Amino acid sequence: MQNDKLDNYLRSHRKKLGLTQREVAFILGCQSGAKVSRYERLGRVPSLTTIFAYEALFQKPARELFAGIYDRVERAALRKVRLLVNRLKKRRENPALARKIENLRALVDGGAEELRYEPLRDA
Amino acid sequence: MIDMRYQELRVLAVDPHPRGFGYAVFEGPARLVDWGTKDTRTEKERATLYKLEELVTLFRPAVIVVENCDHPKSRRNARVSRLIERILLAAHAFGVHGRTLPIATVYKTFAGTGAGTKYAIATALVRVFPELMVRLPRKRKPWQTEDSRMSIFDAVALGLTYFRSLRRPKTARAQTAGPQDTDLHT
C-alpha cells in the first residue's frame, strides 16, 4: 500500500515536542485545536503564514514537514520543465535560448544546486 | 517479499488490550512517526477495526504487525486473540501485509539490552525514542492492573522486532547504528 512519503509530518513533530493540538493552535494563532487536527489529518491545507509558523516552531524546512506534498509538486514541476525544454528546442537557436535550455536541463538532471549564475558580460 | 527500501518501510504495529489498543507507526527502524492508544469501550471489535482503518488511511503502511497468539508463550485471552485474527483479515482487505511475531521473539530482541520484563523493555525504548518518555507510566505494583499506555511500548517493541527480523542491507545497518541505539538496531 505504501508508495511514497506521508503528505505531512506535523503530527509526528508535534508529538516529539510533547505539545497538544490546543497548544499548537495557540502558537499558530488559531481559535482551537480542531484546525490543527485538520492540518494533521490532511483535511485542510495550511496557509503560507501558517506553514512559516510551523517551520519556526519545529525548526524544520517546509519541504520536510510537508514531504509528500513537496515530492508531488516537485515531480509535477520537473515534468513541466521537461515539456518546456522540448518546446524551446524547437525554436530558432540563439545564445540566450541555449543558456536557458542548459539551465533547465540542469534542473531536470537533479543538478539544481549547480546552476551557474554567471554575471552578464558588458556588451 | 516486500519490495521496499528498508529505511522508508512504513510499518504499523498494533497491540490490542482489554480496553482498546496501542499503536506505533515507523518509517524505517529509527523513525517513529506516530504512537498512541485508542480506547474502545462499546462494540470493541467493530470499534477497533474502524479505528484501525482510520490509521491505515492516514498512514498508508506497507505492513501491519501484531502479536502471534498461537505461540505457546502467548497469554492473550480468547477475545483479544480473535480480535488479532480479525485485524490480520482486515489488513488483507486493506491491501496491507499482515505479519505476526511471537512475544518470545520480542523478549529475545531486547535480551541484549538487559531488559527482561515489559517495564524494562519500555524503559529501554525510552532511551531509543526519548519522545516516548511522557507516555511511560509508573512501574506498577503487583496488585495494580496494567496501565493502558503500556500497549504503546508493546507496539513499539513489536515494530522494532519486526525490523530486526528483516534482512537488512549493509548500508542501512551502518546508518541506523547510533551510539545510543546500538543494542537495539544491530
Image (cartoon, grey):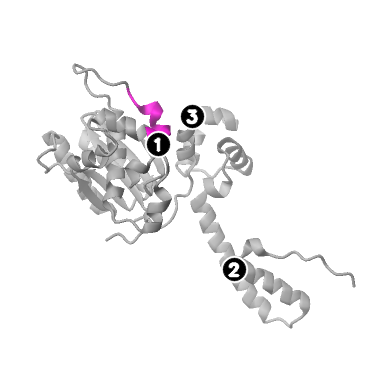
Q: Is residue B67 left or right of residue A32?
A: left
Q: Image height check: is B109 above or below B7?
A: above
Q: Position of residue A70 (x, y in %)?
A: 54, 54
Q: Quadrant of the N terminus of chain B?
A: bottom left
Residue B169 visible? The answer is yes
Farthest-out residue, left: B72
| In this rendering, the label closer to the viewer, 3 or 1 | 1
The residue drawn where x is 24% and y is 51% is B98
Same subunit under labels 2 and 3? yes
The residue drawn where x is 32% and y is 39% is B156
Q: Amino acid at mark 1?
A: Phe
- Measure how far apart labels 2 and 3 are at the Cα level: 39 Å
Farthest-out residue, right: A123
Looking at the rendering, the stretch of residues picked out in magenta corresponds to: B127-137
Predominant secondary structure, magenta span: helix
Name the foreground residue: B165 vs B41. Answer: B165
For disc 1, the marked residue is: B129
For disc 2, the marked residue is: A108
For disc 3, the marked residue is: A19
Residue B38 visible? The answer is no
Q: Position of residue B64 (x, y in %)?
A: 28, 48
Same subunit under labels 1 and 2? no
